[in-house]
Amino acid sequence: MTNENLQLVYTLLCDDVRLEMGNKISLMGVFQNIMVEQLPVSLIKFAVVNHWRGAGNHQTEVRILAPDKNNLIVTSQPTGIELAPGGFTDNVSFFVNVVFPVSGTYWVQTIADTVILEEFPLIVTDAGTVAGNQPAEEISETIN
């Protein structure tokens, strides 16, 4: 997760991000996987938050690939980040109206200076797929 003078410390997926007073960020709805009633699903909005440490000027980008790793679902606009020596910054990439057509393992890639620094799975499932993979007694319903 390091590229010469740049280190990707962590990546989080969440429903939304707000900038608060004092230059603090608030993350809403942090998640690791997506489970919906049925597919395809269009997510109205979600964000990928990258926390960087290092020095210098860099170009970053986030991509989400289909389960086959050949088809691009969505990509962020390249973003420039500037770090003073020993500095850190957060970069937030917002995505809107992203369609996940089928269940499977999608891939979230974080790229800096044209190098893939991180790639992790994002599992998208629907209730039918989950029900088909588990005995009925293991399926439970949560009421909020």
Image (cartoon, helix red, strand yellow):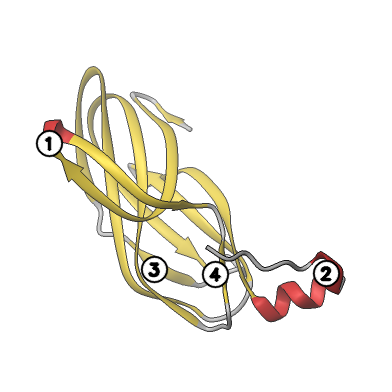
* Circles 1 and 2 in contact, beta carbons < 8 Å: no
Label 1: few (<14), some or many (≥20) within 10 Å?
A: few
- Whether 71 is drawn above or below 8: the answer is below
The residue singled out by tag 2 in the image is: 134
- The label shown at residue 120 is none
Residue most toward the front? 143
The residue singled out by tag 3 in the image is: 74
The residue singled out by tag 4 in the image is: 66
Q: Secondary structure at mark 2?
A: loop
Q: What x and y, as percent, mark residue 103?
A: 63, 75
Distance from disc 3 to disc 2, alpha carbons, whole Å, reads 31 Å
* Circles 3 and 4 in contact, beta carbons < 8 Å: no
Nearer the observer: mark 4 or 1; the answer is 1
Residue at x-position 56% and y-position 59%? 33
Residue at x-position 83% and y-position 69%? 134
Q: What x and y, as percent, mark residue 106?
A: 57, 64
**Would residue 127 appear left or right of 134 to someone viewing this image?**
left
Most foreground residue, 139 or 35: 139
Label 2 amino acid? Gln
- Whether 27 is drawn above or below 38: the answer is above
